[in-house]
Amino acid sequence: MPYLLRVELPDVPGSLGRLATAIGHAGGDIEAIEIVEKRLDGTALDDVLLDTEPGIMPDSIVSACNGLDGVRVVWISRYASGGLVLDLEAVEELTAEPAEALDRLVDLVPRTFRVDWAARVHRGKGITHATGAAPSELEFVELERAERLELDGEDGDGETLYAGARIDGNEVLLVARRGGPEFLESEVARLGHLASLAQSISRG
């Protein structure tokens, strides 16, 4: 069973090795690791995509990680949307077909940012492109920059976390995570940069 683990650990040589060893001893097999954020306090947040041996429960992986000095599991969840896509890979895909860059942005965001769905929403037309898990209707949100969002009514269920980025004055990119983890400031900034880049690429 594939899982995505978000873990806080000391940003020092050897930390990832100790983490990988602990996960392996607990029955997990690491498939990919991405550094999400490096902090001024000397810690880092990493996303770890891993698979588990039959019969292994995620609790045992969490306990093994938390047992390491200075390591804390922030969040773990099943992960069924394929491998991780790094920002550079996403940019390469956006530039491959400039005319389709905005649609490709939406398609790539779930794996690049580990969100459940993404959608482009136009001020007048509503949803112009969305991934399969997105709601059938979403309201346009006025945005000047990328930021965390709170959606009301049918779109806000209290358990889903939202973020959005401006594409242009009439269109925005909305993304959502069910159950966490919280969107980091660095993730929100990356979302904004990628949306701006896709818009620039689409214009040629």
Image: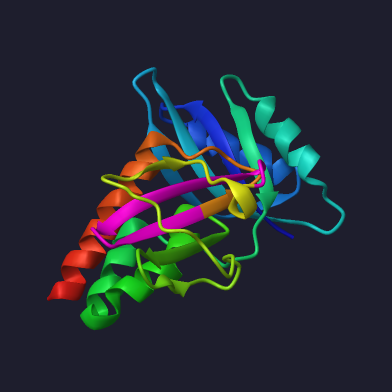
Q: Position of residue 143 (x, y in %)?
A: 31, 48
The residue at the far left in this view is 204
Q: Is residue 197 left or right of residue 52?
A: left
**Which quadrant: the N terminus?**
bottom right
Majority SS type along the magenta span: strand
How many marks the image carries: the answer is: 0
Pick whichever, 24 or 181, lies toward us.
Answer: 181
Q: Is residue 84 visible?
A: no
Q: Is residue 61 left or right of residue 90?
A: right
Q: Position of residue 74 (x, y in %)?
A: 61, 33
Where residue 65 sits, quadrant-wise, is top right
For the point 51% across and 28% down, the residue is 9
Q: How is the image coloured?
A: rainbow
Pick whichever, 90 or 155, lies toward us.
Answer: 155
Where residue 99 sits, quadrant-wise, is bottom left
Pick whichever, 9 or 118, lies toward us.
Answer: 118
Position above or below: 91 against 177: below
Task: Please state the extent of the stretch shown in magenta in the rendering.
Answer: 157-175
Q: Say if the magenta span includes residue 198.
A: no
Q: Is residue 61 left or right of residue 188?
A: right
Q: Say if the magenta span includes residue 163.
A: yes
For the point 66% across and 37% down, the residue is 22
For the point 51% across and 47% down, the residue is 162
Position above or below: 176 against 161: below
Q: Position of residue 18 (x, y in %)?
A: 57, 33
Pick whichever, 50 or 96, lies toward us.
Answer: 96
Position above or below: 68 against 111: above
Q: Position of residue 199 (x, y in %)?
A: 22, 66
The residue at the far right in this view is 55
Q: Is residue 138 visible?
A: yes
